[in-house]
Image (spheres, grey):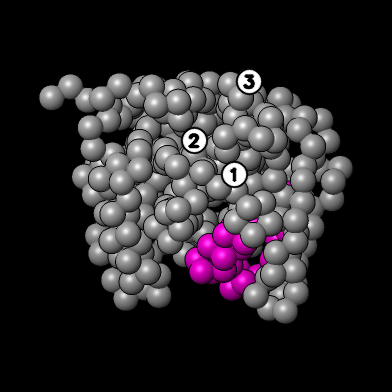
Amino acid sequence: MRTLRTPDERFADLPGFDLDPRYADVPDGDGHTLRMAWVEAGPADGPVVLLLHGEPTWSYLYRSMLGPLADAGFRAVAPDLVGFGRSDKPAEVADHTYARHLEWLRTLVFDALDLRDVVLFCQDWGGLLGLRLVAAHPDRFARVVAANTGLPTGDRPLPPAWQRFREMVLHAPALDVGRMVAAGCARGLAERARAAYDSPFPDGTYQAGPRAMPGLVPTTPDDPQAAPGRAAWGALARFGKPFLTAFSDGDPITAGADAPLRSTVPGAAGLTHPTVAGAGHFVQEDAGPELARIVIGFARGQIAPRRS
């Protein structure tokens, strides 16, 4: 597996994101290792909040949530998925599979970091991976917050907006990652922030990860990851720990995906599930401080029960 590593100078002077990166090596599944990056804020012995990004972002997405979580006494940990951010980037689209990404992430957060009693916050592919980890390792998690994400199995058609996005990513001659992120924000994205989302990708050869991810989402019942996805839903149907959805009201990609999570996961019953108003797909960009307050309150057991 040929891998690329984004030069450090690409990440200089990122607006609002001055945390030092940390690194660990994980097996690449091909006899070698990949370097994965993460940032964290807050006390090392604080309760863990794991923040998982998706496509085509990286841990920079959580810059307005890390500080408030740390100030509230939490150890906030935000990894970069393989192929994104400061993590190594397998150079071929075919190097990226759902199973490999799941194992790379599992190895980082459980083997390298040994995270336990985790409060998970997941969005986009952060949910496709994070919810699978919850299903397989429920003992590692204390609570879950799912925002603008889901767990597709190929048994139901995905929204037209997602289909259009998939075709664009698969076939566009060049990917403008900053523009893609901006298009998923309802409240605008500053030019310097757009540039920060471009920073992991000096040129198109580094973009196999963003190119691959839409094609890895199960879209047919016989997809290789469809059956594991169904098994994960079965495990989530037995997950009794607190489970919150915090979707935005302006995301055509995941609109309605919160309902099956709330109806399936026992830990979601009886909670008031907030909707983040005026936010798009990248709800962390549009409403990061609001989300941080939601996570802090939920982690402290302060989410009010739903009125009957």
235 part of magenta stretch: no
Q: Quadrant of residue 35?
A: bottom right
Q: Please give the residue where the numbered disc 2 appears in the rendered image.
A: 282
| 161, 307: nearer the viewer | 307
Nearer the camera: disc 1 or disc 3: 3
Mark positioned earlier in the residue sequence (1 or 3) = 1
Q: Quadrant of residue 151?
A: bottom left
Q: Position of residue 175 (x, y in %)?
A: 61, 51
Q: Position of residue 125 (x, y in %)?
A: 48, 51
Q: CA distance from mark 2 to mark 3?
A: 23 Å
Is 222 above or below relative to 121? below
Q: Amino acid at mark 2?
A: Phe
The crowd level at tag 2 (other Cα within 10 Å; few <14, some 14-19, many 20+) is: many
Q: Please give the residue where the numbered disc 3 appears in the rendered image.
A: 71
Q: Amino acid at mark 3?
A: Asp
Please say whether residue 62 is visible from this viewpoint: no
Q: Which element type, helix, strand or loop, lies under badge 2?
A: loop
Taking the spot 77% from the left edge, 46% from the top edge, the residue there is 22
Mark positioned earlier in the residue sequence (2 or 1) = 1
| 269, 85: nearer the viewer | 269
Mark positioned earlier in the residue sequence (2 or 3) = 3
| 147, 145: nearer the viewer | 145
Q: CA distance from mark 2 to mark 1?
A: 9 Å
Q: CA distance from mark 1 to mark 3?
A: 24 Å
Q: Which residues are magenta?
A: 83-108
Numbered label attached to residue 160: none
Numbered label attached to residue 57: 1
